[in-house]
Amino acid sequence: MALRLIIGNKNYSSWSLRAWLALEHTGAAYREIVVPLDQPDSAARLREHSPAGRVPVLVRDGVTVWDSLAICEHLAEAFPAAHLWPEGSDARAVARSVSAEMHSSFAALRSCMPMNVRARMPGLGRTPASLRDIERMLALWKACRQRFGQGGPFLFGRFSIADAAFAPVVFRFRTYDVALGEPERAYFDAMLALPAMKKWQRDAEAETWAIDEDEYPAFRA
């Protein structure tokens, strides 16, 4: 089985992180291709892999899958032993719902607190809209942990696509020093302790590319 995952800079590409974490969790061998974003040749290089011109892109046995949630769903089907979705039907329904909400919502959080794994910008990015997004996010974490989290430290006990969906938010909350209560803090700590998250962080910190709008966002002035 030939697997390739095309991703953007690990320091900034939140969408790439989601697909990468899910693929890492399967344990499958794959080739990782990093296309630095916001470079003069980025668009042309991305179109070599997908007509959508965006990351992430998964190529499996000649089939191209793009969009992070579609990739995660494909991996769940291709590697059932990885249990990328919770086993119970109720848990799966909620896990899919929160993953889809993360995928399509929280525009203010994304805009005001762009993912920047290397940076530390405590207190920045707070607006009425981003604070509402944070409140909703923490409510989701707490509800999932309380209802389905008895079997482990993640949202649905064991690691799932839902955790991959929220992984960029964990890095964002650390970068901008978002206050957390319990059990949100315990979940946050468990995510950062994941070997795959640590690996992504090491790679992000070793990158030399910089995107000015994420290093020096307008609200930082």
Image: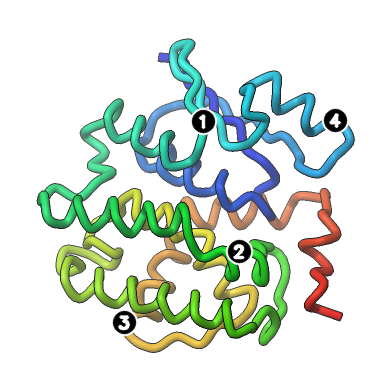
The picture quadrant where one finds residue 99 is bottom left
Contact check, label 2 and label 4, Cβ < 8 Å: no
Which of the marked residues, 3 or 2, is nearer the chain's N terminus?
2
> How packed is label 2: few (under 14 Cα within 10 Å), some, or many (20 or more)?
some
| Among the two numbered marks 1 and 4 on one chain, the one whose residue lies closer to the N terminus | 4
Q: Earlier in the sequence, mark 1 or mark 3?
A: 1
Q: Which residue is mark 3?
A: 183
Measured Cα–Cα span from mark 3 to mark 4: 44 Å
Q: Earlier in the sequence, mark 2 or mark 4?
A: 4
Residue nearest the observer in this picture, 25 or 84: 84
Which label sits in the foreground, 1 or 3?
1
Residue 91 in percent (x, y) is at: 16, 56
The amino acid type of the residue labelled 1 equals: Trp
| Residue 35 as seen in the image, left or right of residue 138 | right
Q: Position of residue 55 (x, y in %)?
A: 61, 37
Question: Looking at the image, can residue 214 be seen?
Answer: yes
Q: Which residue is mark 2?
A: 110
The alpha-carbon separation of the residues under discs 1 and 4 comes to 20 Å
User: In the image, what residue type sits under mark 2?
Assistant: Arg
Separation (CA) of disc 3 from disc 2? 23 Å
Q: CA distance from mark 1 to mark 3?
A: 33 Å
Q: Which residue is mark 4?
A: 41
Q: Quadrant of residue 38?
A: top right
Element class at badge 4: loop
From the top left corner, tell me how far across and down residue 102 is, in percent. Answer: 43, 58
- Specify few, some or many for label 1: CA neighbours under 10 Å numbering under 14, 14-19, or 20 or more: many
Graded by Cα atoms within 10 Å as few (under 14), some (14 to 19) or many (20 or more), the crowding at tag 3 reads some
Task: Nearest to the eye among marks 2 and 4: give it.
Answer: 2
Q: Secondary structure at mark 3?
A: loop
- Disc 1 secondary structure class: strand
In the image, what residue occupies the spot 23% across and 42% down? 83
The residue tagged 1 is 66
